[in-house]
Image (tube, rainbow, N blue to C red):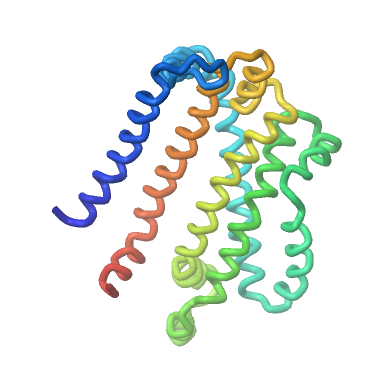
Amino acid sequence: MNRRRIGLILEIAVPLLIVVALILWSAGSTSFYFPPVTDMLVTFKETWLFDRFGSDVVPSLYRLAAGYAIATVVGVAAGVVIGSVPLAARAAEPIVEFLRAIPPPALIPFGILVLGIGDTMKIFVIAVVCLWPVLLNTVDGIRGLDPTLTATARIYGITGWDRLTRVVLPGSGPQIVAGMRTSLSLALIMTVVSELVASTNGVGYFVLQSQRDFAIPQMWSGIILLGVLGYLLNAALGLVERRVLAWHRHATERAR
């Protein structure tokens, strides 16, 4: 049995064992705040597979996807400029360091003041928070390009758009994707936080309302859903990463 197959088995078996252990441990629970896991799972099925999917899950995913996409595009574009142009790097560094030091939830009051409590505010907050990991990783990736690679491109006269798409972005791809993975986690967090503070729908709003109504199984079902969404989103990004960066994985395996 090869290492990859063992890793796949562990990836499936360990979560299942944890779920089974939690079900057995909570089976006799009479706590109002920690009901049996089976009750949570039944509530999860009743709530999210039917009633609330369109009214809460879809809006949350839309906000997350829009903010994340904006952050990725802007972060990569700005990172390419900052990483490639020393003057731009010197001009942007103090601004970037100041803005990324602001705690993400502190942006929500400003967003509400300027944009209201609609989707635009939430997308704005998500995009701003997710921007920094992508931007900084892009800058690091470009600055860390193999000098031999860039010299070869220069010798063969590869410039402009061809240099960007054939040399710069592929060469810095692993760092960019690492930043995108960090930003994806932040996107989910800020989606929930923005919905907790100012929203009339969404998974975060549902969790808060369930807590206020003391609908504890519903609250836990929302928390479980957030974990499932986070896992699926990371898995989807992992599939994209394996496809786009297949060359990098093969090169790493050969180096070993």
Can you give x and y, in whole percent of width and height, for residue 123 in the image?
A: 67, 38
Q: In percent of the image, x 48 and y 84: which residue is there?
A: 147
Image quarter (top left, top right, bottom left or bottom right) of the C terminus: bottom left
In the rendered view, does 239 fall on the left or right side of 64? left
Q: In percent of the image, x 41 and y 43: which residue is there?
A: 236
Can you give x and y, in whole percent of width and height, for residue 18 in the image?
A: 36, 35
- Image-quadrant location for residue 242: bottom left
Q: Indicate whether 138 appears above or below 223.
A: below
Residue farthest right in this picture? 113
In the rendered view, does 34 fall on the left or right side of 87? left
Q: How many marks?
A: 0
- Image-quadrant location for residue 14: top left
Q: Which residue is nearer to you in this view: 252 or 46?
A: 46
Q: Indicate whether 156 appears above or below 53.
A: below
In the rendered view, does 112 fall on the left or right side of 160? right
Q: Indicate whether 41 appears above or below 151.
A: above
Q: In percent of the image, x 78 and y 68: which residue is there?
A: 94
- Image-quadrant location for residue 192: top right
Can you give x and y, in whole percent of width and height, for residue 56 in the image?
A: 58, 22
In the rendered view, does 29 fall on the left or right side of 10? right
Can you give x and y, in whole percent of width and height, for residue 66 in the image?
A: 60, 39
Q: In percent of the image, x 31 and y 44: which residue is there?
A: 11
Residue farthest left in this picture? 1
